[in-house]
Each structure stands twice: as structure tokens, then as C-alpha cells.
Image (spheres, rainbow, N blue to C red):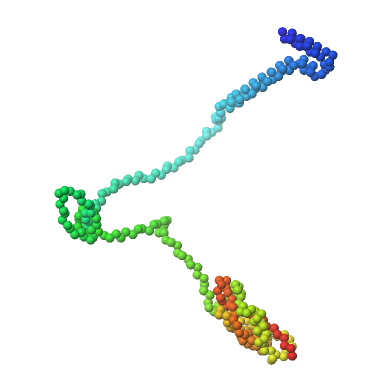
Amino acid sequence: MKHLNTNQEFRFNEILFEHRNKEYGAYALRNESDRILTKALFIGVSLLAAISITPLIISAFNNEPSTVHVPTDGPPVVIKLKKIDPVDTPPVQIIKPVEHVAPPNQKQFDSSVPTPKRDAVEPIKQEKPKDATAGLIDNFKGEPVKPDTYVPPVPVIGNGPVTAPPIQVKVEPKVPDNHIAGQGELAVEASYDGGINSFRNKVMNNFDGSGFDTEGIMKTTVTFIVETNGTISGLKADGKDADFNSEAIRTIKSIKGKWVPGKNKQGEAVRSYFKFPISMKFDN
């Protein structure tokens, strides 16, 4: 039956491609279509079977029991077990029952409110002692109640009582009154109240050069202390001519006006040195 169908299809193909180019691809494909379809079917079934069986094979290999090799020759293997120290258990503490303590025999008076009754009898009035305390019965012969002198204990943390740390007050060393501040101690240098140029002009105008007949330039540096009250003291001159030094000191002493004292880094007025150079040339 298969050969009959094949022959009929072959005859149909011969009629269809009569007087045409049979070497064209369509002619060959129509003749081999059955063989190609059969081959494709077998390949598809084979792939499907392989995909289905692969998980079973993998699970079969994984489920194999693992084997442990135990050597039968050679010396025996000795396994040393570590000794575990017993856990120290605390001793059992026996809790003693609380013993009944009799109340102290102290003076007290009955402070309870009596229940009203129809045939109540008024009790005998007794004077209450001042050292008695309120209670449920009248006991005026007991010991006087001690005043409450309870002092709470100081809480202890660690090895001693809790004490507040001492308050440390930083005390700045007091500068002596006669101390003269150096250049590194000053934040603001001393200055003349009217300015240094005003002071220089007053020195030049008040200087008496009539006794000097030298042709050169005479120099000196006058050093003095500016006090905290604005006055000057301790004048010294280091020039080579003694008369010129004396006149320079006299001139600076004669100048009126106050000085502004220098200040240290804390903003306090302090004594400090001030140097004033003097240079003059006299024309004869």
C-alpha cells in the first residue's frame, strides 16, 4: 500500500514538473519529503526520551550509599577522649523560716475608733503619756518610744562610698606688682596718649642743643618703664656721649602727657619697657 502511494505521488510529481527544470530544489524536496519527516520524527522521540531519563540516572547515582574504608592491617587506631571537668555546683542553701519576733514593750494608746452600741459604757478617761505612740491597746507602763533617728546609709558602688569629685578651680598665678612684662608676654604694647609722632615732635622741640658743637650725628636710645598708671620711670640712655644722654633723659622727663600701659594676653595692664631712639645733627 505504501509503495502504491509512493508511486502515485511520484507520477504526480513527474506530471507536475514535466517540461520544467527538475534540478530545481522543489522537485527533490517533494520526492524526499517522506524520508525527511520520518527521520525528524525519530530524532524528536529520541531527544524527548533522553531528557526524561536524565534526572532518573542522576538521582540513581546520588542515592548510592557512601562507603567508609576501614583499614584492616596495621596497628589499631586509638582515639583519646578529652576528660571533661565536672561542673562546680554551688552548695544547697537551706532557707530558714522567719522566726516570730515579739513586738517591743513600748508605751502606746488605743487609737482605734470604738463601735457605736446602744448600751455603750463610756471608758474611764486616762491621760495619755507624751512619749506613747498610737496602737490598738492602752499600754502606759511600757518603755518610752525612742525618737526616730534613722540615717539612710550611703550607697556603695564598687569598693567605697560614692563621693562627688572635688571641684578643681584653675588658679592663675598672680603676677607680682613689680614684674616687668617682656616682649613675649605682651598682647598690646605701651603707647603715648597722643601718638608716637606727637611724642617725637615734643622731644625735638624741647631738646636743648646749645652746648653741643660737634659736626657729626649724635645718637642715643632712651629706655624707660611705662607704669600701669600711665607714668614713666627708670630712664636710661646708652649713647656714647654722656652729656647727650643726660639731655635726652631730661627732655623726655619734661614732656607732659600720659602713656597708655601695655596689656598682657589676659587683657590686664602691666608694666613694660619702651625704647625711644634719638638722632640729632647740630649745625654750627
For this rendering, which residue is in front, 150 or 81? 150
For this rendering, which residue is in front, 141 or 155? 141
Residue 135: % across, % down: 23, 54
Q: Residue at x 24, y 55 (%)?
A: 134
For this rendering, which residue is in front, 211 or 129? 129
Q: Residue at x 58, y 27 (%)?
A: 62
Farthest bottom residue in view:
211
Left or right for 219, reference 114: right
Residue 106 seen in this snapshot = no
Q: 123 above or below 209? A: above
Farthest right residue in view:
19
Residue 154 seen in this snapshot = yes
Q: Residue at x 21, y 54 (%)?
A: 110
Q: Quadrant of residue 181?
A: bottom right
Left or right for 38, reference 223: right
Q: Quadrant of residue 163?
A: bottom left
Which quarter of the figure is the C terminus placed in?
bottom right
For this rendering, which residue is in front, 14 or 45? 14
Residue 78: % across, % down: 51, 35
Left or right for 167, reference 59: left
Q: Residue at x 69, y 91 (%)?
A: 210
